[in-house]
């Protein structure tokens, strides 16, 4: 597969515009006017205009110039006046961040005048395969955004959709079948789960742990049969395997579930009293925290019994514990950037008729108490600093901003008019 890493993405987008004639034919004539929208946002509305974001803007967490609907209210409308339909299927929606992302993408698609379809297979690969097969046979979507339950098992379904003319956009977890693009964090590093591993290396050195008296960490696995789980393990171990003052105890599989993770934490911290660190590969962080609380060792970072907790994913309860000083760090694998990017690329490809990169790697950063209110996600704060449950108030990421200019401009109605000549 041709891979477009961060430094090349700008050139890719330039090439997209230069060679627009090589893309699939754009639809014509101009789309019919969209039906009245419930959103008051047009393509000029910025975060600074939104009641409910004032406090976040005032403390520098949200870039006030972020657009609320850069696409335009009838951007995702076909020439016959019907909406483009975007089908999202998730690993599961029982994880806080994924549930929020589902609602966020629903808001984004509808802001642009499109139709949002969501399917939750709840970790069942066969149900996810069936959904894709039904989508293809019934023609119920113009694009599929696939968060695959299993990389290998979803390959045939992904290929079926692509061969049937429905582009598939992999996000977070890649399938081995055909796809239009793959947006993800490079879990194996660099700038993946290694940023969490580096936290523990730095902490072990800071606290004076030695080879004879190492910092002992529990690593909670998601699922060893899942390649993405293996990659999270590899990235985490990248800096740790270079250290001689850290020991890692690996758990049984948690399958992202809070209850499983809570039990794993309680069992291991009881069996191994030397444990002083906790790393959770994916969903289940809230359960891990509750496991520590049940044992009476979820305490402030200045207390002797403090367990150093750094997570790959995060959610509402985890961030509350960071604010309270009982959880120490997490990565920016908070999903908002991935879902935002894959949606914008789907717009570029499906609505604007333009080719998109085959792979986009978004860098991850480490978030701790000191920088949790910094706009680390392309003008937005880390999840869940935006108003939880009020997804219509979430601005759209601008991928030309820090932390890295990804070279991807907002897909807009004005650009559609220019490319399609109306």
Image (cartoon, rainbow, N blue to C red):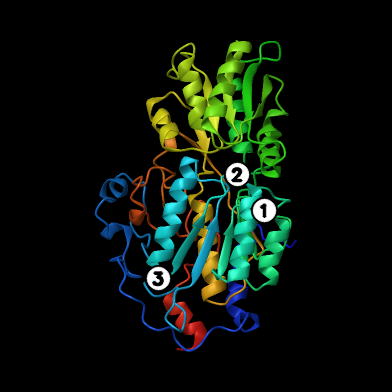
Assign a secondary structure to mark 3: loop
Indicate which disc, 3 or 1, sits on the residue closer to the N terminus.
Answer: 3
Q: Position of residue 334 (x, y in %)?
A: 50, 44
The answer, for residue 396, to whether it is visible in the render is: no
Kindly state the secondary structure of the residue where label 1 is placed.
loop
Q: Position of residue 236 (x, y in %)?
A: 65, 34
Residue 359 placed where, x, y %? Answer: 65, 60
Left or right: residue 311 versus residue 77 is right
Query: Closer to us: mark 1 or mark 2?
Result: 2
Disc 1 or 2, which lies upstream in sequence? 2
Residue topped by disc 2: 123
Q: Quadrant of the C terminus?
A: bottom left
CA distance separating discs 3 and 2: 30 Å
Between 419 and 224, the residue placed more toward the observer is 224
Q: Identify which residue is drawn at 59% across, 23% down.
A: 264
Q: CA distance from mark 1 to mark 2?
A: 15 Å
Asked whether the residues under the numbered discs 3 and 1 touch, taking CB atoms below 8 Å apart as contact, a structural biologist would say no
Task: Count all numbered tags in the image, as a single digit.
Answer: 3
Residue holding disc 1: 174
Residue 360 image label: none
Q: Position of residue 163 (x, y in %)?
A: 70, 71
**Crowd around label 1: few <14 · some 14–19 · many ≥20 (10 Å):** many
Residue with the mark numbered 3:
113
């Amino acid at each position: 597969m041709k891979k477009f890493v961060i430094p090349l993405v700008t050139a890719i987008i330039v090439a997209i515009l230069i060679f627009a004639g090589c893309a699939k034919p754009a639809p014509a004539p101009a789309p019919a006017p969209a039906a009245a929208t419930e959103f008051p946002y047009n393509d000029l509305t910025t975060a600074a205009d939104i009641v409910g974001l004032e406090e976040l803007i005032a403390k520098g967490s949200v870039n006030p110039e972020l657009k609320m609907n850069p696409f335009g209210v009838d951007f995702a409308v076909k020439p016959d006046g019907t909406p483009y339909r975007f089908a999202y299927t998730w690993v599961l929606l029982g994880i806080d961040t994924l549930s929020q992302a589902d609602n966020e993408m629903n808001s984004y698609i509808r802001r642009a005048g499109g139709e949002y379809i969501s399917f939750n297979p709840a970790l069942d690969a066969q149900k996810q395969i069936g959904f894709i097969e039904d989508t293809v046979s019934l023609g119920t979507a113009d694009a599929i955004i696939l968060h695959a339950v299993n990389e290998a098992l979803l390959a045939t379904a992904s290929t079926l959709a692509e061969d049937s003319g429905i582009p598939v956009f992999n996000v977070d977890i890649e399938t081995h079948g055909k796809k239009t693009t793959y947006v993800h964090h490079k879990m194996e590093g660099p700038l993946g789960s290694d940023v969490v591993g580096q936290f523990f290396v730095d902490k072990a050195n800071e606290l004076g742990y030695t080879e004879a008296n190492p910092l002992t960490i529990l690593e909670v696995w998601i699922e060893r049969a899942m390649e993405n789980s293996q990659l999270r393990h590899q990235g985490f171990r990248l800096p740790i395997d270079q250290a001689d003052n850290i020991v890692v105890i690996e758990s049984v599989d948690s399958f992202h579930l809070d209850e499983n993770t809570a039990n794993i934490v309680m069992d291991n911290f009881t069996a191994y009293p030397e444990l002083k660190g906790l790393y959770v590969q994916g969903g289940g962080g809230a359960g891990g925290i509750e496991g520590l609380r049940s044992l009476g060792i979820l305490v402030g970072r200045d207390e002797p019994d403090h367990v150093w907790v750094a997570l790959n994913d995060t959610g509402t309860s985890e961030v509350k514990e960071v604010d309270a000083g009982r959880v120490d760090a997490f990565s920016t694998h908070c999903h908002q950037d991935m879902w935002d990017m894959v949606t914008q690329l789907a717009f570029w490809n499906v609505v604007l008729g333009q080719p998109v990169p085959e792979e986009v790697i978004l860098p991850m950063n480490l978030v701790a108490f000191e920088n949790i209110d910094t706009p680390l996600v392309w003008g937005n704060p880390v999840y869940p600093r935006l108003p939880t449950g009020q997804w219509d108030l979430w601005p759209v990421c601008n991928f030309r901003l820090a932390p890295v200019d990804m070279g991807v401009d907002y897909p807009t109605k004005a650009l559609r008019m220019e490319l399609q000549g109306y």
